[in-house]
Amino acid sequence: MKKLFALLLAVVMVLSLAACGEKKDDTTVENKYNTKTPGVLTVATSPDYAPYEFYAIGEDGSAELAGFDIALIKYIAEYLDVELEIIPMDFDGVLLELANGSVDLGVAGISPDPDRANSMDFSDIYYEGGQAFITVESKADMFTDLASANNPDISVGAQNGTIQMDLAQQYSADADIVTLTKATDIIAELVSGKLDGGYVEYDVAVAYKANYPELHIVCEVPYEVEGNAVGVKKGNEALLAGVNEAIAACIEDGSFSKFVADALEQASGNIYEGLLEDK
């Protein structure tokens, strides 16, 4: 009888170990994209950059993340069949969190600049955007071309940690370059007369002009690395491949074109740009 009991106990232990092994395999399958949290896509964004990412304000005053970057990242999460956690922060924080590996992705109108390649991987380009130098209508006569923005008597603004800051340092090296935390700060300082000009992405300038008619787009700014990509945690090849597959599907089925059109329309309405805790 004791031998029979021991034999049954051994069988139970073998089955238990097998079950544990099967559970481990399931966990591996669930986290096939090697995300920070299994089954969850953790994404950093900077919601101060309409029409890319911003807050749409409802009639009841509620704020909801919007923009074509937000729509794209929701599409990607659904395509990969994972839950989505979006963490709003300043733009330089997005780059820092990606570099530290604290998030899986960064989506914030990121240009795949080679200088950033050591701290993150880049998805395929999903949007072809340009750069712009802007001012206000009352100062439009000061700027006949981009060369006129390189003047020690003027002040120009650019967002910290962005390609636009690099462009300001390249094309307005002799000017007083003012570093600002958010793109909205550039617009506010232009409208208030504290800045003479500023560097922003072209479609962002168009979106701002819809709400601030006094803005004036002086010219497009040459930039070798045109377009935007999703920032991916360095070395996560499985996730990078999945994101690229999702982006290709999003563009091919026409979803992304609709995301852009919807975001441009929404950006001309009641919106808030920045972190809600700063509101």
Image (spheres, rainbow, N blue to C red):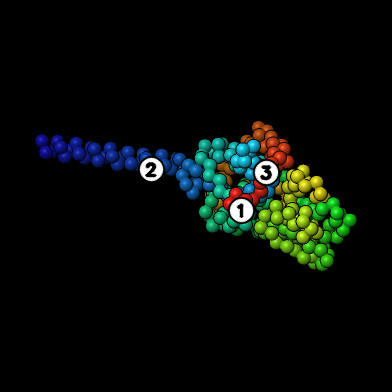
Q: Report if residue 206 is visible in the image.
A: no
Report which quarter residue 244 is drawn in: top right
Residue at the disc numbered 3:
271
Residue that lies at the very extreme toward the top in this rendered image: 253
Task: Tell me how far mark 1 sits from mark 2, CA to CA.
Answer: 43 Å
Report which quarter residue 23 is drawn in: top left
User: Which of the pair 119/277 is nearer the observer?
Assistant: 277
Amino acid at dot 1: Asp
Category of crowding for the residue at label 3, using alpha-carbon neighbours closer than 10 angstroms: few (below 14), some (14–19), many (at least 20): some
User: Which of the pair 239/45 is nearer the observer?
Assistant: 45
Q: Residue at x 69, y 46 (%)?
A: 50
Residue at the disc numbered 1:
278
Labels 3 and 2: the sequence-earlier one: 2
Residue at the disc numbered 2:
24
Labels 1 and 3: the sequence-earlier one: 3
Disc 2 element:
helix
Task: Tell me how far mark 1 sits from mark 3, CA to CA.
Answer: 14 Å
User: Which of the pair 4/239 is nearer the observer?
Assistant: 239
